[in-house]
Image (cartoon, rainbow, N blue to C red):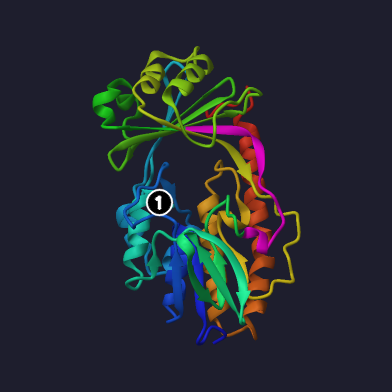
């Protein structure tokens, strides 16, 4: 096997990086995951994830975790409502499609993956600050002057990766839209009218270029995202946003929406605001890498979250790359990586394009879910 006596470093303990480690460990490969989070229970912000039947679930199946995913994930109905809170349509899961893409909490998914790995596979509190060749191996540098060595590096630390430049000079671009995320713990108590409207389903609404998507049951919390075209006077920094800054913006943006939505915004204790970004795949990746290194997940192909393709494409990356590195069909690690990258560019470009087209459609003034 081309990875015999080789040490693999995966940068990032998100779903894609952890799945990559699991797939390699099944072949008794020495792999270590380095993660910037301080500890395993660090809370991951964001809505639930749905793993698709022909991509993300295939990776879970190969990792021996598909049944565990089904146990923890929930098939959820969809409710479409208008801007006044009137129900337009409800779509229930059926026995035939209930396992197509059930929703799972991000922390539950991380816990499931971590429990599948050998003890101490993940090294926490390790923010990678740089890589360099050193005596035929990669020398990884972390904050606090900590270092480690590896023969192969797999970069899975997200769309804003700072070490991606060793593989590509492509720059992250803003797409022209934004998302504001909110969360309410105990929604049945704090926004009862809106919680009842959701009726334990994914709620979706759109009006005049503003889109709202809500999950009322994200491990005890109601989480939601607001998507719209980014205004010229955008004044919010990436990351946590002050409630006093967001509320006037939302009050103006949703002034024609019903009172149940106003209640939702008023009781949201904090928000997370960011412009939507993508990493173009049109620029060829570097071929003169000193040692084996590649990108998977958002680090490779950051895309808008409007087709549910991001994590699923990343898990497809992990499945393909792990297969190439362990199937005995390639004469070298570089050849296995090159084949992975060539194939990934095709399906990731298609997924990215679908996501971008959905984004353009959703932020149009005339868009409607109904």
| Whole-percent x, y for residue 217 in the image | 32, 38
- The residue sitting at the left extreme is 189
- Was residue 170 drawn as part of the magenta stretch in this picture? yes
Q: Secondary structure at mark 1?
A: loop
Vertical placement of 239 versus 187: above or below?
Answer: below
Between 53 and 342, the residue placed more toward the observer is: 342
Q: Residue at x 65, y 86 (%)?
A: 331
Q: Is residue 355 left or right of residue 44?
A: right
Instruction: Pick the quarter of the image with the N terminus.
Output: bottom right
Identified at 34% across, 57% down, the residue is 39
Residue 150 percent location from the top left of the image: 53, 76
Residue 207 visible here:
yes
Q: Nearer the viewer, residue 204 or 315?
A: 315
Q: Quadrant of residue 86 in the image?
A: top left
Evaluate whether residue 104 shows in this view: no
Q: Is residue 253 left or right of residue 30?
A: right
Please say whether residue 174 is one of the residues in the magenta stretch. Answer: yes
Q: Which residues are magenta?
A: 164-180
Q: Quadrant of residue 261?
A: top left
Residue that mark 1 sits on: 96
Of residues 72 and 332, which is closer to you in this image? 332
Frontmost residue, 227 versus 34:
34
Residue 358 spot, x, y in % from top left = 61, 38
Above or below, 326 against 21 in this view is: below
- Image spot of residue 239 (x, y percent): 49, 37
Could you tell whether 171 is left or right of 24 in the image? right
Q: Which residue is pictured at 66% across the width and 52% down the height?
A: 350
Q: Residues within 10 Å of mark 1 (few under 14, many from 20)?
A: few
All told, the count of numbered labels is: 1
């Amino acid at each position: 096997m081309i990875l015999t006596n080789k040490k693999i470093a995966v940068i990032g303990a998100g779903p894609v990086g952890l799945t990559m480690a699991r797939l390699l460990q099944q072949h008794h490969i020495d792999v270590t995951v380095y993660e910037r989070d301080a500890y395993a229970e660090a809370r991951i912000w964001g809505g639930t994830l749905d793993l698709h039947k022909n991509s993300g679930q295939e990776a879970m199946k190969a990792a021996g975790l598909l049944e565990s995913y089904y146990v923890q994930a929930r098939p959820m109905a969809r409710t479409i409502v208008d801007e006044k809170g009137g129900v337009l349509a409800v779509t229930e899961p059926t026995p035939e499609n209930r396992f197509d893409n059930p929703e799972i909490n991000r922390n539950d998914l991380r816990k499931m993956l971590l429990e599948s790995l050998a003890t101490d596979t993940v090294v926490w509190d390790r923010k990678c600050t740089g890589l360099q060749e050193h005596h035929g191996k990669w020398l990884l540098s972390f904050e606090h002057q900590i270092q480690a060595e590896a023969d192969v590096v797999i970069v899975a630390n997200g769309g804003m990766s700072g070490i991606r430049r060793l593989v590509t000079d492509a720059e992250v671009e803003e797409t022209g839209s934004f998302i504001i995320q909110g969360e309410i713990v105990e929604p049945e108590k704090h926004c009862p009218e809106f919680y009842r409207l959701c009726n334990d389903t994914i709620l979706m609404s759109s009006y005049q270029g503003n889109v709202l998507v809500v999950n009322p049951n994200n491990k005890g919390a109601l989480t939601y995202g607001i998507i719209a075209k980014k205004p010229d006077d955008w004044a919010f920094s990436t990351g946590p946003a002050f409630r006093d800054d967001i509320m006037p913006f939302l009050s103006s943006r949703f002034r024609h929406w019903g009172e149940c939505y106003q209640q939702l915004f008023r009781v949201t204790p904090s928000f997370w605001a960011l412009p939507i970004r993508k990493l173009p795949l049109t620029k060829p990746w570097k071929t003169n890498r000193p040692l084996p290194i590649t990108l998977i997940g958002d680090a490779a192909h950051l895309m808008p979250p409007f087709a549910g393709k991001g994590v699923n494409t990343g898990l497809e990356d992990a499945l393909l790359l792990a297969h190439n590195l362990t199937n005995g069909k390639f004469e070298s690690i570089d050849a296995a990586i090159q084949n992975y990258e060539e194939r990934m560019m095709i399906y990731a470009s298609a997924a990215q394009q679908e996501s971008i087209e959905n984004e353009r459609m959703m932020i149009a003034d005339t868009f409607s879910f109904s």
